[in-house]
Image: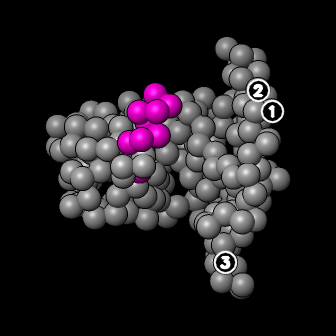
Amino acid sequence: MRRLKYVSDTLKIPVLTDIHKPLEAEMAAKFVDIIQIPAFLCRQTELLVAAAKTGKVINIKKGQFLSPEAMKHAVSKIRESGNDKIWLTERGTSFGYQDLIVDMRSIPTMQKLNTPVILDVTHSLQQPNQSSGVTGGKPEMIETLAKAGVAAGADGIFIETHPNPSQAKSDGANMLHLDKIDDLLGKLVKVRQAIR
């Protein structure tokens, strides 16, 4: 947590982190600007309420097992706890056993809940449950999915990068190589300008 605070203070940027248990919410709130609820925990009432009570922005990742409409329940738990600072993150829907897909209709559907919607591009390209026991991915589709998300009106884009994805401790199979991020961001700005 102190390292995240150092990054925030040094670079003058907001930072976020996942929490997994209600007791982590208050601790994380001392160090980060945004508390993130992982997709597999997005229906956990106690976790959502504890996060909401910090007063921080709460970013809830939509579970791959939920419809975008079902996110209204997570949003209402945060709002009923007195916090209206909510983001929702689309990160795909399970398709069979080894793939995720993103239905771009999810973006405007969740925006109807009066929350910004972020598209988690790289996690949406994961391929879980591989026979090797290691999650796979389709990083060659990052640009396509990111452009589609911007064109669909996403309020933000989440992309994991690494200087050497094959050496990343996790999620390397679906990461963007760090030297490609500038070019991609330039293309996304052009897409955004074209649809305005």
Give me the residue at 53% from left, 47% from top. 90
Name above or below for residue 188 compared with residue 168.
above
Query: In the image, 13: left or right of 182?
Result: left
- The residue singled out by tag 3 in the image is 134
- The residue singled out by tag 1 in the image is 183
Q: Which amino acid type is marked by label 1?
A: Asp
Residue 141 drawn in magenta: no
Image marks 1 and 2: residues in contact by CB distance under 8 Å: yes
Q: Position of residue 158 (x, y in %)?
A: 59, 43
Where disc 3 sits, the SS reads loop
Which numbered circle lies on residue 87? none
Is disc 1 surrounded by few (<14), some (14 to 19) or many (20+) residues within 10 Å? Answer: few
Give me the residue at 49% from left, 37% from top. 117
Q: Which amino acid type is marked by label 2?
A: Gly
Where disc 2 sits, the SS reads helix
Name above or below for residue 156 compared with residue 103.
above
Image marks 2 and 3: residues in contact by CB distance under 8 Å: no
Q: Position of residue 130 (x, y in %)?
A: 70, 79
Task: Tell me the CA gap for discs 3 and 1.
Answer: 29 Å
Q: What residue range appears in magenta?
A: 5-17
From this viewpoint, is residue 143 visible?
A: no
- The residue singled out by tag 2 in the image is 186
Where disc 1 sits, the SS reads helix
Name above or below for residue 82 compared with residue 169.
above
Q: Quadrant of residue 42?
A: bottom left
Residue 11 drawn in magenta: yes
Task: Tell me the CA gap for discs 2 and 3.
Answer: 32 Å
Q: Quadrant of residue 190?
A: top right
Give me the residue at 70% from left, 40% from top. 146
